[in-house]
Amino acid sequence: MYYRMKKMGRHVISLAGNPNVGKSTVFNQLTGLKQHTGNWPGKTVGLAEGIADFKGKSYCLVDLPGTYSLSSNSEEEEVAQAFIESDRSEATVCVCDATSLERSLNLVLQIMQASDKVVVCVNLIDEARRKGIHIDIEKLQYLLGVPVVATAARQNEGLDDLMAALSKIDSGTLKMNPYMKEALVSLQENPEENKLALLDRASAIANDVVEITDEYYNRRDRNLDKILTQKSTGIPIMILLLIMVFWLTIQGANAPSDALATFFAIIGDYLNQFARIIQMPEWLRGALIDGIYNVLSTVISVMLPPMAIFFPLFTLLEDFGYLPRVAFNLDKYFARAGACGKQALTMCMGFGCNAAGIVGTRIINSPREKLIAIVTNNFVPCNGRFPILISIITMFFVGSSVSLGGSFLSAILLAATVILGVLTTFWISQLLSKTILKGVPSSFTLELPPYRKPQVGSVIVRSIFDRTLFVLWRAILVAAPAGLVIWMLANITIGDYSLLTRVTDVIDPFARLMGLDGTILMAFILGLLANEIVIPIMVMGYLSKSTLFEFESLDQFKNLLLNNGWTWLTAVNMILFTIYHWPCSTTLLTIYKETKSSKWTWISFLVPTLMGVSVCMLTTFLAHSFNLV
């Protein structure tokens, strides 16, 4: 790929830097791509690339993972070091944080040891000015012996100067001061002394070029941290924010979901009319419209509205800098469980999609702790399971899906359900760390980045395109064949009963032991393809219909469930099994790709499944033992 770029006359430039320095923002502004910028260490683990044009020349920019060093102690460091030192990268832009220059300079010096074609980009210069931090750019350039450019990427300030510095690669004048190169190379003869010498030199250079006129420049951040990371307030605020995000999601998604369902129902009527006009065979019409189309429309109407609300809210908290504080608050609990504090971040990513949470485990350096995070990620309900939880909680434990009070109570109970999943994550993590994944929790540096005002417009656009539509498209790809399979099971008969009914009858006795029934368990089994289709399949089974059924209201749905023998215990077990059951097919495939192991993929399947079956059986046994049903 990169060799082809060179043949096309495009110079390949790598962008390196610490996490939270705005490196990916520089990349986005120069290339026009909307590469997601996570506000925690190691978010960008893959290599994003894009084309930047400047004065008739094209440059292929490669956004490397955020890393603190090139010591190859983590996957991010290995990827960054390998690319910078390879012949694919012709030059490196090292992005620094103007508000914390000393920390950034350590990586700059390491990169200068690996490459003699380096441009230093001192980003966030606008934040530095607001905080009373002044950097002598010319003196910094003299001391480093490489081009140095000050930028504020969000405001497009200094980016033309950065490209002008990079354009020197065409004339061959982009070179390090030979005396500086000689001094850095000489330090590499002794690795241990080299590490300390680079730290000392970074500190000396920073002290020489940085002037702080306001010694209380970070007072606001520290005051906020006293509230958001205190033992007495950190966890309660975290739970309150979780409830508020769920409430806004529930309250805001009701009307759009209903509107989408109505819209797709109208389109479905037109499609059926068209099928009759062209005299389409009934089996083909049923497979395409009753099967594939109805499943797809259900997935879209159920998933799109809550995701379009949840993801932007989640991204706003992320851009504000709150997620690293969540990791800080939960770090000690994960440490007690023998796991890594970074697992808090991968757990948060699982709220949107468990597959995304699995990919996020790449930020965990320890292979043992990465496996713990992978196996337990499914205990956090993803966006596909939220509709199940919300509808069951609302129907059986709240009684109103319209009022503000009802939706707020639903949000509280939903948050309590999520907290149960989090507590289970701690317990299973501890169990794994004492059995098949024994080990001592590793230490890591968790940076608490400065609080920043989120760019609301950019957040909405980015979260819609990067997250909502991406997850929705993946669900659609799974739901389409699932719709066909469901339709076939419901329409292929043996005797007087469909395959779906016969399988349901076979598994019903086991499901009863779990406080469920065969129809519910069958819906979960078919929901392996996509959790979003669990409820529609269940309704179809109860109505003995050969197509998916859309209920017009939760009251109608509740009456259907009550008429089929549901009690409060059935509802409780439905909620428990929704939290504790196998990962969806997309997540399992992602687990296999990340672990490259069938063994750990099966373990990731069996652990939550056995947990779900055991908990539901225990709940049912206790309820009947005390005559509660």
Image (cartoon, rainbow, N blue to C red):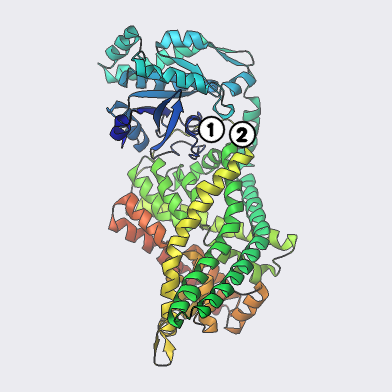
Q: Measuring 44% from the left and 84% from the top, which residue is drawn there?
A: 501
Determine whether the residue tagged by mark 1 lies in a helix, strand or loop. loop
Q: Do the numbered discs 2 and 1 sit on residues whose CB atoms are within 8 Å?
A: yes
> Which quadrant of the figure contains the N terminus?
top left
Question: In the image, residue 264 lies at what x, y percent?
Answer: 59, 68
- Picture quadrant where residue 509 is located: bottom left
Which class describes the residues within 10 Å of circle 2: few (<14), some (14-19), or many (20+)? Answer: some
Residue at the image position 45 percent from the left and 28 percent from the top: 53
Q: Position of residue 303 (x, y in %)?
A: 55, 60
Circle 1: residue type: Leu
- Quadrant where the C terminus sits is bottom right
Answer with mark 2 or mark 1, whichever residue precedes in sequence.
2
The residue labelled by disc 1 is 448
The residue at which mark 2 appears reads as 225
- In three-dimensional space, the C-alpha distance between marks 2 and 1, rounded to whole angstroms, equals 9 Å
Identify the residue at horizontal 29%, vertical 35% (top origin).
4
Tell me residue 418's x, y (percent).
56, 57
